[in-house]
Amino acid sequence: MKIIRVLLGATLGVALYADTTGPAAPAKSFIDYFRPIPARGPLTAETWGAPGALPRDVHNGLEDVTNKYCYWDGQILRGDDGKYRLYASRWDEARGHDGWKDSIGVSSLSDHLLGPYVDRGPMWPDNQGGKGHNVTALRLPDGRYAVVVSETRQGDVFVSDSPDGPWTHLGGIVTHGDVRKRASNYSIMVRPDGDFMIVPRSGQIFLSKTGILGPYHAQGPSVYPKIAGLEQRDLEDPCIWFSGGRYHIVVNSWSQRKAFHLTSKDGITGWTLRGLAYDPRVDFVRYTDGTVNRWDKLERPGVVIENGHVVAVTLAVLDVPKNEEKGGDRHGNKVIVIPFDGAALDRDLANVPELPSEAPAK
């Protein structure tokens, strides 16, 4: 193995490991495909937040400018009416960051992909008081909409004929071979072959041929330890999707405060490190006028796919370390939406010769 250096934007070189038996890694990493953010309103410093998060566009994503509520997670779906729904978790800011343990699942609405998103309240108020965290959402093959929650609930699924609800509790996801036994950080998708696929915090791959509730069967242990060059500490928040003929995972390291981009041809084997996905110390949360926001924490990534490519990435952000967000202190959380050039990412990856590590297991 040897260390190569890739340029991240124009500000930071990061060492990545490349397999010397194969071709060189692409010159760009996931973080280089973020686009400048067009402001949906004037940038302002007259709002909550540490200096690094100011000035900012409070109309981007999902934010409570009064700082009554904190928002986390954040998956966007576009309805047949052309409007966008952002599904998230919410708790009272007065509780500080630890309030996430009692968060509820909420939906929000916007006419524009970037926001502003208007909170419309809890999605299932009569089911455990609306309880929900690790909120994600997807369109089912039969046309219905599904919201999945984990961490504080055991992989519960709520469905509706409309992206606006009402939401019905369909049941809990069943997994076989789960090393953690507890539903955590579920990322879920429908594969091109029609199977449902889950990647939880553990990094195992689970497949179901019998619908969203499963049963899902583990395809083996976590894929992370076998990925050359991937730092293994405290990995969480995987986000799985398919584009450009490859499966992709962005996975976050909470202790290192950065995330990594992985790809696989079949979504099960041959997972390969492609580089840095994001890092709060890199100036990639940038507006079109050049203003940069540096949030302390960037977690819970989600992707918006249109015409087969990622067009935006959502991130749950916090302006200070989690243990410093005490409640009532002008700090908090929101969900931001950043434009992304997924078509260019997929095109560039398609032009890179296959690495030996990508070969599916025989």
Image (tube, rainbow, N blue to C red):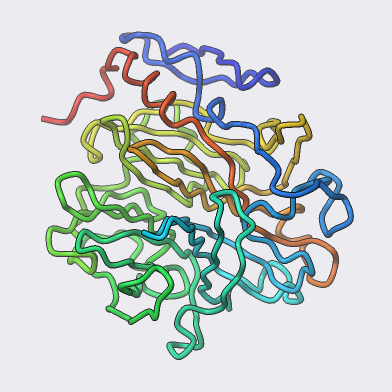
Question: Which x, y percent locates residue 23?
Answer: 34, 8
Q: Is residue 87 above or below residue 200?
A: below
Give me the residue at 19% from left, 44% from top. Answer: 192
Q: Residue furthest right?
A: 46
Q: Quadrant of the C terminus?
A: top left
Q: Residue furthest bottom?
A: 126
Q: Quadrant of the N terminus?
A: top left
Give me the residue at 37% from left, 26% from top. Answer: 346
Q: Camera-side residue: 158 or 143?
A: 143
Residue 19 lies in quadrant: top left
Question: Which x, y percent locates residue 351?
Answer: 33, 14
Q: Residue furthest left?
A: 362
Is residue 362 toward the left or the right of residue 67 in the image?
A: left
Question: Which x, y percent locates residue 83?
Answer: 48, 58
Residue 62 lies in quadrant: bottom right
Q: Is residue 179 above or below residue 172?
A: above
Give me the residue at 30% from left, 50% from top. Answer: 204
Question: Which x, y percent locates residue 334?
Answer: 66, 58
Count of residue discs: 0
